[in-house]
Amino acid sequence: MKTTFGVELECLIPRSYIGDDSQFNPGGHGRGNQIGNAPAGWTVERDGSVRSTVDGMTGVEVVSPILEGEDGLVQVVAMCDYLTEIGRRSIASAACMCMSEQSVWMLQPTLGRS
């Protein structure tokens, strides 16, 4: 059975990574822009629910394309590692929608803050 999934990562990233000529140029909510060197389909968008009270940080939502199998999981881990590498302060929430031929379900784990 083929199972596909996607993730949304709401997080704070350094403002120095935001802008037209940078890795992250957030589009409007639901209209994200491709993230620089990320695999095709990984986008970043503004999300009014992600607010920063930390100087030099901006709240964004990172959205994956439709993913599948082990390769999809590898992409999720790589994106989380990249966000950590550039100095993201926290992932405020994460959601994963999984779809198979028979069902759709939503996973929303509780994440610790760093």
Image (spheres, helix red, strand yellow):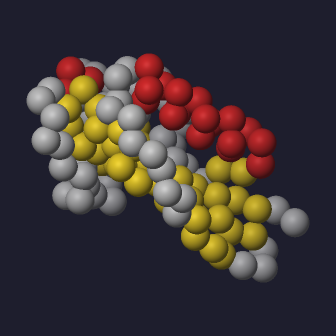
Q: Which of the pair 1/11 is nearer the observer?
A: 11
Quadrant housing residue 105: bottom right
Query: In the picture shown, does residue 96 fall above or below 35?
Result: below
> Could you tell me which residue is drawn at 35 percent across and 30 percent down?
88
Query: In the picture shown, does residue 67 fall above or below 98?
Result: above
Left/right placement of residue 4 relative to residue 113 reads right
Relative image position of residue 57 (x, y in whole percent) = 20, 32
Relative image position of residue 33 (x, y in whole percent) = 34, 42
The answer to whether any part of residue 33 appears in the image is: no
Q: Which of the pair 75/25 is nearer the observer?
A: 75
**In the image, farthest residue toward the bottom:** 102
The quadrant the N terminus occupies is bottom right
Q: How many marks?
A: 0
Left/right placement of residue 26 relative to residue 82 reads left
Left/right placement of residue 33 relative to residue 68 reads left
Query: In the picture shown, does residue 59 fall above or below 21?
Result: below
Quadrant housing residue 102: bottom right
The answer to whether any part of residue 58 appears in the image is: yes
> Could you tell me which residue is drawn at 54 percent across and 59 percent down?
109
Relative image position of residue 21 (x, y in whole percent) = 24, 21
> Could you tell me which residue is drawn at 15 percent across and 27 percent down?
56
> Could you tell me which residue is drawn at 43 percent across and 29 percent down?
83
Left/right placement of residue 3 relative to residue 28 reads right
The quadrant the C terminus occupies is top left
Relative image position of residue 48 (x, y in whole percent) = 19, 58
Q: Which of the pair 49/17 is nearer the observer?
A: 49
